[in-house]
Amino acid sequence: MRNSTERFVSALQAYLKAAFTERVSKVNAKDSEIRLADIALWQSGYSGVLSGLSHYPGCIVLVNGKTLTDPYTTEYSVVIGIGLTADDPDYLERMGRYWEDILEDSIRSDWTLGGTAIDTDVGVRFNFDCTSNVYLIQAELTCQVDIGGYVYMEGNDDEGIEEGTEGGSGDAEVFSMPEVPPTMGAVSSGEGDGLLSPLRDDHDADNEGVGIEDASVRLEVKED
């Protein structure tokens, strides 16, 4: 049986997958030259680092803290990180700006994140960095989650979000990700030592799709 944090992360990833795929399609329809690729690798917890992912574009969802605000509500501190790479620096920066907008719009358009949370606190913080051929995007946010709500209903361990259940959209599913363009490859570990320390480490993330239970990378939080 998964714990509440794993259930929250799973629901959040399901929302982001659907939101990202929709927005990537819209970008490519409007800008035929960008050839923007959808997320090729999803990871959670401490199982990966943005500067050493095995596939790009990659997204890591990390819960780095939580507060029990009342008997029924948990406040989760969440980091959503996106890593991109390309051989052409100009193309990489252009692609990075598009993904900044995609992540921002995915959060701004639905503060419940597809019913995953009761609400997301205002003051979402974004950080960006581009070093050693890797473009890094990080959003730090706080989500208020009803631990007695749909995400944690008894009997949903394997089925996920049930259609028609309060707070659920009924369309949370895993999308098949397209192949990464030839310009986007793996980057060796340790590259990129910019400002996104919560999702960095000196080791490669070779374990694709590893869940929180297989977490192996330590968290290094940089104080403001």
Image (spheres, grey):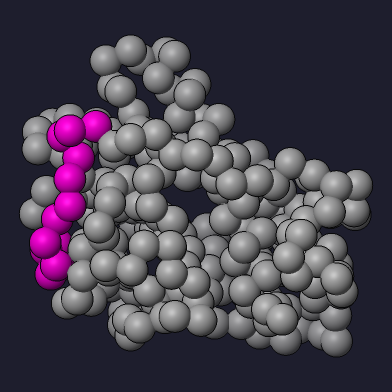
Residue 45 image point, x, y percent: 46, 74
- The reply to whether the magenta stretch includes residue 190 is yes
Residue lying at 16% horizontally and 34% vertically, measured from the top left: 183
Residue 23 image point, x, y percent: 51, 30
Is residue 126 in view?
no
Specify the quadrant of the image occupied by residue 42.
bottom left
Specify the quadrant of the image occupied by residue 138.
bottom left
Could you say which is closer to the camera, residue 54 or residue 189? 54
Residue 222 image point, x, y percent: 31, 79
Residue lying at 35% horizontally and 15% vertically, measured from the top left: 31
Left or right: residue 189 compared with residue 156: left
Query: Which image quadrant: the N terminus?
Result: bottom right
Picture layout, residue 47 above or below residue 95: below
Left or right: residue 141 compared with residue 74: left
Residue lying at 19% horizontally and 76% vertically, measured from the top left: 203
Left or right: residue 8 compared with residue 196: right
Picture layout, residue 88 above or below residue 50: above
Query: Which image quadrant: the C terminus?
Result: bottom left
The span picked out in magenta is: 181-193
Left or right: residue 212 compared with residue 193: right
Q: Which is the main secondary structure of the residues drawn in magenta?
A: loop
Could you say which is closer to the camera, residue 149 or residue 112? 149
Residue lying at 85% horizontally and 71% vertically, measured from the top left: 155
Residue 81 image point, x, y percent: 39, 58
Is residue 80 in view?
yes
